[in-house]
Amino acid sequence: MNVTFVGVGAIGLPMALQIAKAGHTVTGVDLSDSARTNAEAAGVKAVASLSAAPEAQVVIVMVATPDQLRKLVDQAGTSLDNQRWIVMSTVGPSSVREQGERLRALGARVIDAPVTGGVARAKTGELVIFAAGDPSDVDAAMPVLKAMGTPKITGKNLGDGQSIKVVNQHLCSVHIVAAAEALNLARSLGLEPAAVLELIEKGAAGSWMLSDRGPRMLGPTDVSVTSSIDIFVKDSGLVAEAAKSCGTDVPLLSLAQQRYKMASEAGLGSRDDSRVIETWSNH
């Protein structure tokens, strides 16, 4: 298939590379000069706007925020007959429903397919993809989806995939902050955090986030960024918004969200999300 991939940043580029590796023709779209340069260096042609990309059967969206998705749809043109749009960004249920209906009005076939697994699994094609939409549309997109990971069918309606991702991001948000708090506690108790991490991460108290983020929490502020603090400011906000819409209390999420906001306000917004540990004074 001819694929336009919008958002070839830290996670988008390895996803696009997996699609190309599977034999599809991929053109990246990104406003960032550095992102386009990195894409070209990796072998993916990249342009600065959707209108500059060649005609595609599939448009994959990996932008950062609901507002960016809205602006992208503004640029989509007036006729998208049978073009498949796969929204893989974490934008929340209400955003994908609203923008999905706009795309459908233009003739597009829309699939709600957010991902989990981070940059590490994007690089190996092992993402988990929460795919929702008309079954025939999802089935037609499978060759592209399977190139990036394992699609899990979550429902027939736009927003079903995003709702699963909201639950996923609730846990991710809380687990990262819990890992940071625990490692700071270890340090405060006079223990060596690296030794504590090694002892506990494979036991009942372990978590994927503890094992993945923990080593970076023990590193310097400028540790390599795989997902930024500001991404979790955004994602925890989407979780809070979704919870409010259905009248559900999420007190642990609220505490975690405060930590991400504190980190961002301290100038760490563009740093790796592991740097949330710096909101503890004993760090």
Image: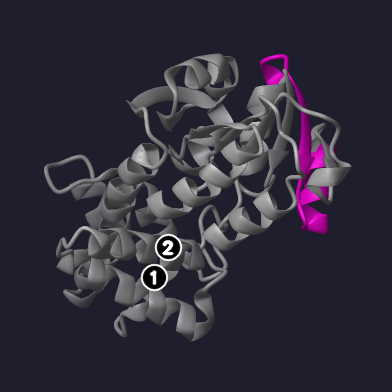
The amino acid marked with disc number 2 is Phe
Image point (63%, 42%), residue name = 12
Q: Quadrant of the N terminus?
A: top right
On the picture, is 203 further left or further right than 216? left
Q: Check if mark 2's residue and mark 1's residue have beta carbons within 8 Å.
A: yes
Which quadrant would residue 225 be assigned to in this image? bottom right
**Disc 1 designates what residue?**
276
Q: Indicate yes or no whether the magenta region holds residue 161.
A: no
Q: Is residue 142 visible?
A: yes
Q: Position of residue 204 (x, y in %)?
A: 11, 43
**Disc 2 designates what residue?**
232
Q: Quadrant of the C terminus?
A: bottom left
Could you say which is closer to the camera, residue 147 or residue 88?
Answer: 88
The kind of secondary structure element at disc 1 is helix
Could you say which is closer to the camera, residue 152 or residue 188?
Answer: 152
Which segment did they paint magenta?
21-41
Q: Position of residue 179 (x, y in %)?
A: 26, 60
